[in-house]
Image (cartoon, rainbow, N blue to C red):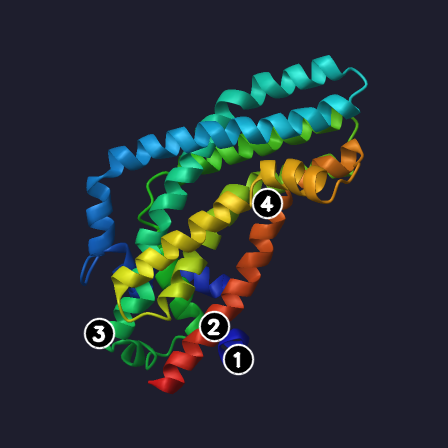
């Protein structure tokens, strides 16, 4: 794993805008991503789907968190009302943007490795002075740079995380409230990063960009549907395990999907590095 030892995060991100691999995946030179171009034609339908899924996801997540706050606050009616007023509409907009980004990301990242393998250019790319980890990150961030809603997601994530922290502190959650607010802030980014890494990892097993795209969509959507607040709190904790949890413990389970995404990201990253070396050796 010499690539991991050579990787320097600070210098990498400083030089990222000038990285030729990053610029190519952004579309500044070289062949464009034809899958993203095709999906962009149907962007209105993707937006409508994102709004629909976002409305359902936003409402279900807020319902779970409101129950936790309502059961812990000394003045539960006020705390629950504040949570609903300050989080409802922004949370639905954020959830819609998250679903849109989640659906677009595989089209941006799934073909990244399979196209290199299909064209036989991965070996050429590996002859550059850059470590393997930097090449993979440059390709991923270059693909994700095509997303046009980063500012919207960032603003709404900070707002929702801040309000969640404030309301939970008012409800007496203390440090747990800060922890939940932090994970709520980074959840949209962890979802997108998971989708990107999962798509790139799956694409290392296919020489066909189309098959890589299909496998990526099947994997990330299935994981997203399984890893949600409703399943964690109602079906798993209450239904399967039949646990009687305190309000503070249930508040932590509200961010259980975020924790699951972070764990999956770690495994996917090391798995992607390993696969990149295997491709190099087998080539």
Looking at marks 1 and 2 on the same chain, the residue that comes earlier in the sequence is marked by: 1
Q: Which residue is mark 2?
A: 273
Q: Which residue is mark 4?
A: 257
Looking at marks 4 and 1 on the same chain, the residue that comes earlier in the sequence is marked by: 1
Residues 107 and 26: in front is 107
Q: For the image shown, how many numbered marks are present on the structure?
A: 4
**Can you tell which of label 2 and label 4 is closer to the viewer?**
4
Give residue 98's quadrant in the image.
top left
Looking at marks 3 and 1 on the same chain, the residue that comes earlier in the sequence is marked by: 1
Give the x, y percent position of residue 92. 47, 27
Please tell me the numbered disc located at residue 1.
1
Q: Residue at x 61, y 26 (%)?
A: 63
Q: Residue at x 49, y 46 (%)?
A: 224
Q: How would you rate the neighbour count of disc 1 (Cα within 10 Å): few for under 14, some for 14-19, many for 20 or more? A: few
Q: How would you rate the neighbour count of disc 2 (Cα within 10 Å): few for under 14, some for 14-19, many for 20 or more? A: some
Q: Is residue 153 left or right of residue 238?
A: left
Query: Is label 3 in contact with label 1 (beta carbons under 8 Å)?
Result: no
Q: How would you rate the neighbour count of disc 4 (Cα within 10 Å): few for under 14, some for 14-19, many for 20 or more? A: many
Q: Residue at x 29, y 74 (%)?
A: 117
Residues 110 and 31: in front is 110
Q: CA distance from mark 3 to mark 4?
A: 37 Å
Q: CA distance from mark 2 to mark 3?
A: 20 Å
Q: CA distance from mark 3 to mark 1?
A: 26 Å
Looking at marks 3 and 4 on the same chain, the residue that comes earlier in the sequence is marked by: 3
Q: Is residue 86 above or below residue 140?
A: above
Q: Which residue is mark 3?
A: 119
Q: Is label 4 in a helix, a strand or a loop? A: helix
Q: CA distance from mark 1 to mark 2?
A: 8 Å
């Amino acid at each position: 794993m010499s690539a991991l030892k050579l990787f320097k995060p600070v210098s990498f991100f400083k030089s990222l805008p000038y990285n030729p691999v990053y610029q190519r995946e952004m579309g500044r030179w070289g062949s464009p991503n034809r899958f993203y171009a095709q999906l962009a034609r149907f962007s209105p339908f993707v937006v409508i789907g994102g709004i629909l899924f976002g409305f359902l996801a936003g409402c279900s997540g807020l319902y779970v968190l409101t129950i936790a706050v309502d059961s812990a606050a000394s003045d539960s009616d006020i705390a629950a009302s504040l949570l609903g007023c300050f989080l409802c509409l922004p949370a639905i907009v954020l959830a819609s943007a998250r679903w849109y980004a989640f659906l677009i990301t595989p089209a941006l990242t799934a073909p990244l490795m399979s196209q290199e393998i299909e064209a036989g250019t991965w070996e050429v790319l590996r002859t550059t002075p850059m470590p393997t980890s930097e090449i993979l990150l440059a390709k991923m961030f270059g693909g994700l740079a095509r997303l046009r809603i980063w500012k919207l997601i960032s603003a709404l994530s900070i707002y929702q995380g801040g309000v969640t922290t404030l309301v939970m502190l008012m409800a007496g959650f203390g440090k747990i409230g800060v922890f939940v607010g932090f994970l709520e802030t980074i959840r949209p980014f962890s979802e997108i990063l998971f989708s990107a890494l999962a798509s790139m990892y799956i694409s290392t097993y296919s020489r066909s960009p189309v098959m890589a795209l299909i496998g990526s969509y099947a994997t990330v959507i299935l994981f997203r549907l399984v890893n949600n607040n409703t399943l964690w709190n109602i079906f798993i904790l209450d239904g399967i395990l039949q646990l009687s949890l305190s309000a503070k413990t249930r508040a932590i389970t509200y961010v259980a999907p975020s924790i699951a995404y972070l764990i999956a990201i770690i495994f996917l990253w090391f798995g992607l590095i390993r696969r990149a070396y295997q491709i190099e050796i087998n080539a």
